[in-house]
Image (cartoon, grey):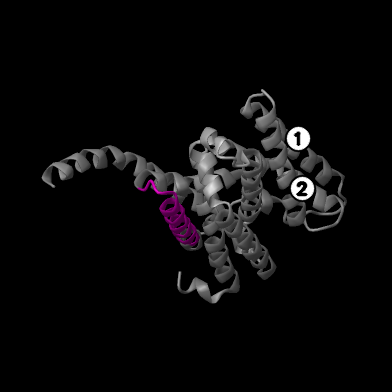
Amino acid sequence: MIEALQFDFMRNALIAGVLVSIACGIIGTFVVINRIVFISGGIAHAAYGGIGLGYFFKFSPVLGAVIFSILAALGMGIVQRQTRQRADTIIGVMWAIGMAVGIILVDLTEGYKADLMSYLFGSILAVSSNDLSIMLGLDIIIIALAALFYKELLAISFDETFATVANVPVNTIYLTLMCMIALTVVMMMRVVGLIMVIALLTMPAAIGGQFVKDMRKMMVLASILGMFFTTVGLWLSYSLNLTSGATIILVAGAVYLLSVAVQPLLRRIQPKRAKMD
């Protein structure tokens, strides 16, 4: 891995992994606790419509993804909270419409779309300095929003009824969370692609939640785990000549399965320690 760092693209990839891991640690924790994992997947796939929009109208596909994913996130959040429709139905509809719009717009766009697949499957090795600047800016926005509305986000995550009684603007905070998920999805699409966003967003937080219960600690642990997964995945992909995004996800998946497997053993050990104390 040290040898690989002599290349600019590897250094950029490593920095991108760190920046994305910070956002995943924070937002992934809220996603897992609120049990809205598939909403993040729906937003991710709907974001493809924005990529098609960018190609068709000749502006940055990343900017298109930001706009489209935020609109999709707000749409999912509003419809879910104000209608009786099932959440999975809403997500499926948004998911399908976003993907369909993106595909049609790309079909209608003249010329060769060289890097189109990188948005679907990720291309962390192709992350540029401009991409890093965008990721840093999105990280700052996400961290600022999480810090500013931490108590409100905590309230709606654990007891929405109490939050409503306490005059917390539940709907507004929920929609803010949706927008934060959308921004995180856009950050991650260059690393693992829109297809695998849901995995990297949720697995570090899910692992962290098995070992710590405090939300702040869970965010920190999830961020550290995300950095570990991206670094090890990059090293393996470089050493074995594998696709980086898929390798990162496989590393994360292996650790998640291992953490699930050791949980029964840890539950047996803890009572014995308590008796000894």
Pick out the residue farthest to the top.
84
Q: Front-most of 2 and 169?
A: 169
Spatial CA distance of label 2 from label 1 is 11 Å
At a point 46% along the width and 47% down the height, the residue shown is 205
Q: Position of residue 112 (x, y in %)?
A: 81, 54
Vertical placement of residue 15 versus 90, above or below: below
Magenta segment = 212-234
Name the residue: 81% across, 46% down: 106
Q: Evaluate whether residue 252 shows in this view.
A: yes
Callout 1 secondary element: helix
The residue under label 2 is which amino acid type?
Gly
Residue 50 got which mark?
2
Query: Which numbered disc, 2 or 1, marks the residue that appears first in the sequence?
Result: 2
Toward the front, the furthest residue is 166
Q: How crowded is mark 1: few (under 14 residues within 10 Å), some or many (20 or more)?
A: some
The verdict on residue 229 being magenta is yes
**Kind of residue sitting beneath label 1:** Ile
From the image, tell me which residue sits under label 1.
Answer: 97
The one nearer the camera, 15 or 8, is 15
